[in-house]
Image (cartoon, rainbow, N blue to C red):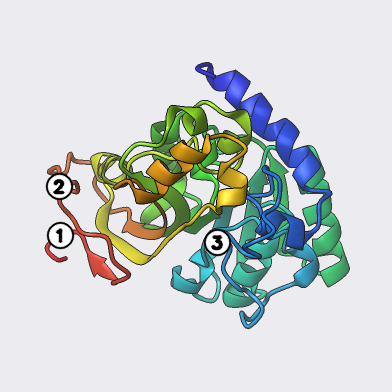
Amino acid sequence: MNKSQELKDIVKQRYAKIAEQGKAENAASCCGATTPSNKIYNIMMDDYSETQGYNEAADLGLGCGLPTQFAKIKKGDTVIDLGSGAGNDCFVARHETGVEGKVIGIDFTPIMIEKARNNAEKLGYNNVEFREGDIDAMPVNDAVADVIVSNCVLNLVPDKEQVIKEIYRVLKPGGHFSISDIVLVGDLPEALKNDAEMYAGCVAGAIQKSEYLQMITDQGFQNVTIQKEKPITIPDDILIKYLSEAEVNTFNTAATGIFSITVYAEKQGSTADKPKLNFSELSTGSSCEPYTGCC
């Protein structure tokens, strides 16, 4: 599992199948990729049901946050959703942009694009479109987006640094993003790191929280802020498929943590190098503080 294209192919194949599964099955597993737990109904996703613009038919239960809730979308904005799935976050974003704005969803799974387009057509949304493509080579021009959102997708991409570069490229100067994703504090057991199901399940492809945040800062983004953070617990009846009982006990008592974080950052008008920040000593919490002097 070292080659980038092989990993992409694994994710594309898995998500073609996941697209046909029900929301409950996806929510009770790791991003729909593993066998559902019979102990925990909802492992990663947040509840959209009270969110304006929410469309139940477009919610496949695959997210790990509510990035649109924190994205500061204004009327008339152009918004891009990375890994748009069946269109859930796009339709929420469209509620915020109004008919004056535009929303573009990008996904590399053809069946997801088809589902999203069908949902948009049923809703009569003429200012929401879906483009098939990789988010590390987005099918959009430079400096077109006011806001970028994404929900539990960057962890699935082998070259995360390239995705961050692409986000910077397509944002307008002064634009910003709000992205929910899975990150780690500490190391996963090798059996989880190297498993294809766990990669597609948004776990094995996750990187260290400090590395994730530093990658964003290194690209030149400013005001990097964790807007929300929550721990992710993988239930034992899923872990036992990959680990022995002793290894499950060790994993559950180790210092390793799996977290969903929603990160906000802004693109400035200059691409000058920014100073590195030391994220490794920052504590885990649920505050909404910029990483330029807090926590």
* Residue 202 on image: x %, y %: 54, 43
Report the residue marked by disc 1.
292
Q: Amino acid at mark 2?
A: Leu
Report the residue marked by disc 2.
277
Q: How many marks?
A: 3
SS for tag 3? strand
Density class for disc 3 (Cα within 10 Å; few <14, some 14-19, many ≥20) is many
- Position of 10 with respect to 69 (left or right) is right
Q: State which quadrant residue 273 falls in.
A: top left
* Residue 174 on image: x %, y %: 34, 59
- Position of 288 with respect to 167 (left or right) is left
Q: Earlier in the sequence, mark 3 or mark 1?
A: 3
Viewer-closest of 64 and 244: 244
Q: Nearer the viewer, mark 3 or mark 2?
A: 2
Q: Earlier in the sequence, mark 3 or mark 2?
A: 3
Q: Amino acid at mark 1?
A: Thr
Density class for disc 1 (Cα within 10 Å; few <14, some 14-19, many ≥20) is few
Quarter holding the N terminus is top right
Disc 1 to disc 2: CB gap under 8 Å? yes
SS for tag 1? loop
Work out how far the residue at label 1 is from the one at label 2, CA to CA, in angstroms: 8 Å
Q: State which quadrant residue 263 falls in.
A: bottom left
SS for tag 2? loop
Vertically, is 66 above or below 208? below
Report the residue marked by disc 3.
78
Work out how far the residue at label 3 is from the one at label 2, CA to CA, in angstroms: 30 Å
- Position of 169 with respect to 241 (left or right) is left
Work out how far the residue at label 3 is from the one at label 1, CA to CA, in angstroms: 28 Å
